[in-house]
Amino acid sequence: MTKKFKGKLCVYCAERPSGSGDHVFAREFFLPKDRDNLPKVPACSECNEAKSKLEHYLASVLPFGGRHKSAKANLETRVPPRLKENRKLCRQLAEETVTVWSEESGKLWVPTIALPIDQASLESLFALIARGLIWYHWRTYLTQEHCVKAFLLTRTKEQLFDQYLLPRAPVKADLGNGTFVYEGVQGEDCPQLSVWRFSAFGGVKLVGDPKAPNEISSRIGVLTAPTHVFRNPELKGLFGVGT
């Protein structure tokens, strides 16, 4: 597999040659039994290293909010070794974790633990994932002339995705029995234009977005397009994105 991807252009920076293949969704997010057929793409060592740091952090935090079939096993078997290696993060989680009331199905409110999470790291990783997937599915590179914007999907943005962007998404995948679920569509006239929607660990609930402090999000959206597209006032108004 290494030779298959070596020497190609890195999908994340589209500048440097790849040294090996990289799993778009890191194997460490999954239980060993759920790691089959994960998307893999060419990546340079610099991008691989930067992406790995994001993955290690989020693989230590996201499982606490897991709601998929493997949630309990993932939290009990995969997270403790990571936190043992990262004492600083372990202390932070212990100090900043609080109990909140969460509304579940049937409008039932139950006490739930809430952990701090770095939203910027979350959005940075999913932006990289989108770069990987647009190459994996359509062999399209995103260069410095293109922008990738990731954001939490509030209720309003979810409705926009449902209504306009992803009614018939040609790409749909469920990796690891709900560990990651995604769907995507590519622009017909512009191959670098794409829209993605992700769910992680069965739909981890995320709150505290400064742009929507009272909203609860359980999915992440990503838009990719030429830079000039993100200067469109209509797009910025709809999604709150821009250059």
Image: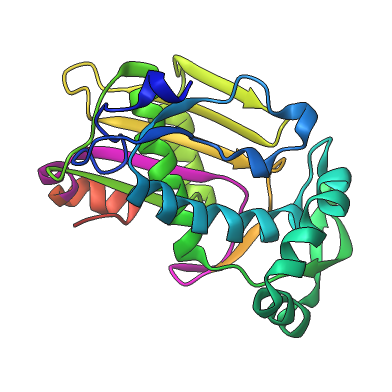
On the image, the x and y values in percent for residue 176 come to 71, 29
User: Does any portion of residue 16 appear in the rendered image?
Assistant: yes
**Residue drawn 25% across the image and 43% down it:** 13
**Residue drawn 63% across the image and 35% down it:** 180
In what quadrant of the picture does the C terminus appear?
bottom left
How many numbered marks, from 0 up?
Answer: 0
Between 118 and 90, the residue placed more toward the observer is 90
Q: Residue 73, relative to residue 2: is it above or below?
A: below
Between 157 and 70, the residue placed more toward the observer is 70
On the image, the x and y values in percent for residue 94 come to 78, 80
**Residue drawn 66% across the image and 74% down it:** 89
Q: Residue 15, relative to residue 192: is it above or below?
A: below
User: Does any portion of residue 216 appear in the rendered image?
Assistant: no
Q: Name the magenta segment's main secondary structure.
A: strand
Horizontally, residue 112 falls left or right of residue 41, namely: right
Q: Is residue 79 magenta?
A: no
- Which segment did they paint magenta? 209-230
Horizontally, residue 215 falls left or right of residue 196, namely: right
Q: Residue 10, relative to residue 2: is it above or below?
A: below
On the image, the x and y values in percent for residue 192 come to 22, 29
Coloration mode: rainbow
**Residue drawn 71% across the image and 70% down it:** 115
Q: Is residue 219 magenta?
A: yes
Between 117 and 169, the residue placed more toward the observer is 117
Q: Residue 74, relative to residue 21: is it above or below?
A: below
For residue 189, which quarter of the picture?
top left
